[in-house]
Image (cartoon, helix red, strand yellow):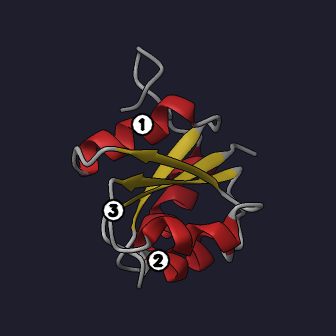
Amino acid sequence: MPSFSVVIAAYQAAETVGEAIESALAQTLPALEVIVVDDGSSDGTAAALEPYAPKIRSLRQDHRGVASAWNAALEVARADFFAVLGAEAIDVEAFALLRAVALRGAVPRGRDGRGL
């Protein structure tokens, strides 16, 4: 079965990132890894990630925006596929789509190996 990484970009998401992580960890098709990138938050997002340290990979960078955070996560992602999940919401549809793509064996990454 194909593997997948869940990528979460978090900026000023101390109040919501835990719920997003819980959602990612609770999927019936488990992710190989959950990668959370704290995009330079100053609201306690880093502290909110600490309880999840054994279960997730977390990165921190200076604030450069969501696209930069996703790219940072994709640089270290190890799975065949990836799903992007917002830190402020639980995105069940993204996981449903990911499962459908993974089970059909679609090409997970572009020619450069970094993404579609």
From the image, tell me which residue sits under label 1. Answer: 72
Quarter of the image with the N terminus in it? top right
Q: x and y percent of residue 54 in the render?
A: 77, 61
Q: Amino acid at mark 3?
A: Ser
Front-lying residue, 56 or 86: 56
Distance between mark 3 and mark 2 Cα atoms: 25 Å
At x 54%, y 75%, the residue is 48
Helix, strand, or loop for circle 1? helix
Q: x and y percent of residue 2 in the render?
A: 69, 43
Whichever of labels 2 and 1 marks the residue nearer the N terminus, that label is 1
Distance between mark 2 and mark 1 Cα atoms: 23 Å
From the image, tell me which residue sits under label 3. Answer: 41
Residue 101 to residue 111: above or below: below
Helix, strand, or loop for circle 2? helix
From the image, tell me which residue sits under label 2. Answer: 92
105 left or right, relative to 52 = left
Front-lying residue, 11 or 79: 11
* Foreground: disc 3 or disc 2: 3
40 left or right, relative to 111 = left
At x 40%, y 23%, the residue is 110
55 left or right, relative to 79 = right
Q: Amino acid at mark 1?
A: Ala
